[in-house]
Image (tube, rainbow, N blue to C red):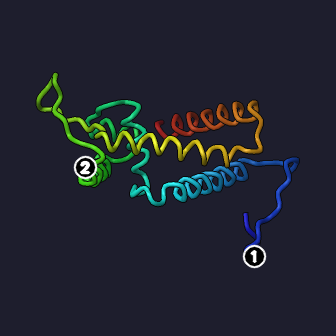
Amino acid sequence: MTGGSGEQAEWSEDAPADEADVLVALRFADRAARKAVAEELAGTGLHTGQELVLAKLLHHGSLPVARLAKVLDVEVPTATKTTQRMEAAGLVRRVKSAADARQVGIELTDRGIELAHTVQQIYDRAGRRALAHLTPEDRRVLRNLLWTITSTLEDVTQL
């Protein structure tokens, strides 16, 4: 957090951390992580969020837009607009399903695959910067805690 002068406020590892403190720290960590990735993405031609589309399609292969929207946790119109922009850039293409000609999937082009691998390298570099001062055990614990928080919040919002 910053003080009134714009300088970074000091924090102590030993200070009590109430729920709000933890969520504020998570939000600032998320913001810093996004900024680090955005800095690394500069010059790739990708717009923010498109790197996640590349990563998901690299992992899942061809997906219908509705399924892609679900795995990205965005609305279908957002996924549609994003994939249209990426298609125009030659990163993805639409393909008809072999099982059902009415279904159209989105898959990576060769250029999209190449850029998806670049994105993986960017996340690796940004991750190394972010976690440079943590031990492997700290990283494991942090990962598990973050997934626990995510699962808990998703369960609560789905009630």
Instruction: Kindly indicate whether the residue at mark 2 contacts the one at mark 1 (C-beta within 8 angstroms).
Output: no
Hey, what amino acid is under mark 1? Gly
Q: Say which quarter of the image contains residue 116.
A: top left
Up the image or down, 49 lies above or below 120; here it is below
Name the amino acid type tagged 2.
Answer: Glu
Q: Nearer the viewer, residue 118 or 147?
A: 118
Residue holding disc 1 = 4
Local packing at callout 1 (Cα closer than 10 Å; few below 14, some 14-19, many 20+) is few
Residue, x 83% and y 61% (percent of image)? 10
Total numbered badges shown on the rendered structure: 2
Asked where in the image residue 58 lies, by quadrant, the reply is: top left
Q: In the rendering, at what x and y percent does residue 118 appear?
A: 46, 44
Name the secondary structure under disc 1. loop
Which residue lies at the image location 57% right of the left edge and 38% below the top edge?
150
For label 2, the SS is helix
- Extreme left residue here? 101
